[in-house]
Image: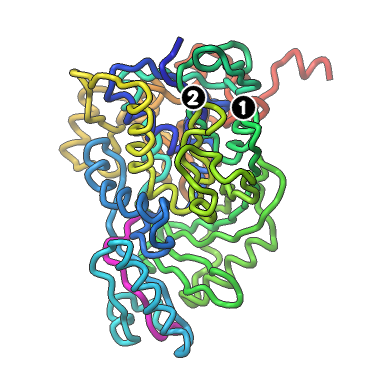
Amino acid sequence: MYDVIIIGAGVSGCAIARELSRFDLKVLVLEKAFDVCEGTSKANSGIVHAGYDAKPGTLKARLNLAGSLKMEKLSKELDFPYKRNGSMVLCFEEKDKEKLRELKARGEENGVEDLCILDKEELCKLEPAAGENAVAALYAPTGAIVCPFGLTIALAENAADNGVVFRFKSQVKEIKKQKEGYLIQAKDQSYEAKVVINAAGVYADKIHNMISERKMEITPRKGEYLLYDKNIGNLVSHTLFQLPTALGKGILVTPTVHGNLLTGPTALDGKDREGTDTTGEGIRQVLEKASLSVSNIPERSVITSFAGLRAHITKLPDEPETWVGIKRSEIEDDFVIGQVSDAPGFIDVAGIESPGLSCAPAVGEYVSEIVQNLLKPSIKKNFINNRKGIPSMSLSSDEERHKLIQEDPAYGNVVCRCEMVTEGEILNAVHRTLGATTTDGIKRRTRAGMGRCQSGFCNPKVVEILARELGKEESEIRKSGEDSWYLLPLETDQQE
């Protein structure tokens, strides 16, 4: 029997796993996909929010500030890309300046430091590209950007290095209460645990409803994005939000930690929990609304579009205290994190939409405290606090590159020319802790295929390397999931 089973290997699940790995606990993570970071965590804005947006007094506000303050130190411990670039909320009408002041006051109540209102002249000095339409801005110097999959993978690897077991392709089918703990039936195996943590993203309601009579409902909210080439990555230096207007919350424009420009997202509620397709209408919305913040963003520099799904809670149980010690009125428009009242030892981590990525380090600690109170574990004496990422030849100095090639000549063999990713980096990604088994797994760990050609040239070589290193046929290599193959086996071709 495991002490703890975590359902879901997104950023919340992996942050919780890492925190629990500090203790003498037997922990298992079950993930239905082939890899970590395959759901909401892989397709978002990559923003570390300063913390001025959430309603004061909410768990969301508390965890946002705490997570934001922890992120820089965590990035150094776990070696993932992070940059404190500051953020701005742009105001486009003189009459709306009061709303900026209200947002500033909210942020200060939440504990965000150094917030200030910029007039047009000050705004133009700090961010010239945003000055044409905006009349003022709320400036948050503590806002930052991060690599969302870099963060999630780093948390997962460090958790695994500290003894947490990960099982992929293990979709949870059924959960049953037992005299002591729970019996979980996954895709092809059953598991027992004293404590279960539900961090299943857009499927968190499905998991919750398996075990509780007090039902909840999550609606997947799709957000579409455009990613631009690095040749315009320095068009802006700050993350630019828009003050909500009658037209909606607006579209952000931001640099990424890897030097691209990103715009989006839209917000459209739907029913398809796997519906990450992009649409012509969504792309038009992003282009049109982004131009309000920054005029003349060159459309020809778009290298890809993508969409992510946020777990938006649309129905909470009617019972006033479905979660231990939490009143229903306290969780409206907030995260739902707590032990389920009619399922002792079952902990929900649900409705983790924006600013969930920013909150992740604090979510990990918060849930860890709940588990500590339940199981009273002892602290692990040999906890490994640091993790080293994959060396990047594109970011290394000439001296560092020479040393890597001397140690392994594969670091001199460039596979992805757009991002200058070498075979050595890909081999590292395959053979390290929780190594990649798909081309998307390679892409997220090394950036091979992330550049201008979007894997058009390098993908065949990546497939070849994966097949060779994993001892498989190339027809067995997948992009991400079971049905995302590149090649059909020869016998299938003959049958057709």
Q: Nearer the viewer, mark 1 or mark 2?
A: 1
Residue 373 screen position, x and y as percent: 34, 28
For the residue labelled by badge 2, is the local secondary structure a helix, a strand or a loop? strand
What residue is shown at x 62% (from left), y 52% (from top)?
222
Residue 140 screen position, x and y as percent: 31, 67
- Magenta residue check for 194: no
- Magenta residue check for 136: yes
Q: How many marks?
A: 2
In the rendered view, would you say 315 is above or below 371? below
For the residue labelled by badge 1, is the local secondary structure a helix, a strand or a loop? helix
**For residue 360, which numbered disc appears in the image?**
none
Can residue 462 be seen by looking at this rendering? no
* Residue denoted by label 1: 211
Residue 41 screen position, x and y as percent: 48, 42
Nearer the observer, 281 or 167: 167
Amino acid type of the residue that numbered disc 2 sits on in the rendered structure: Val
Q: Relative to 120, is 41 on the left or the right?
A: right
Quarter of the image with the C terminus is top right
Q: Relative to 467, is 426 on the left or the right?
A: left
Can residue 244 be seen by looking at this rendering? yes
What is the residue that sits farthest to the bottom in this orientation?
A: 94
> Which stretch appears magenta?
132-145
**For residue 196, which numbered disc appears in the image?**
2
Nearer the observer, 296 or 91: 91
What is the residue that sits farthest to the right in this orientation?
A: 496
Q: Relative to 237, is 42 on the left or the right?
A: right
Nearer the observer, 203 or 85: 203
Amino acid type of the residue that numbered disc 1 sits on in the rendered structure: Ile
> Reading the chain from its start, which is encountered first: label 1 or label 2?
2
What residue is shown at x 37% (from left), y 64% (from top)?
52
Q: Relative to 319, is 452 on the left or the right?
A: left
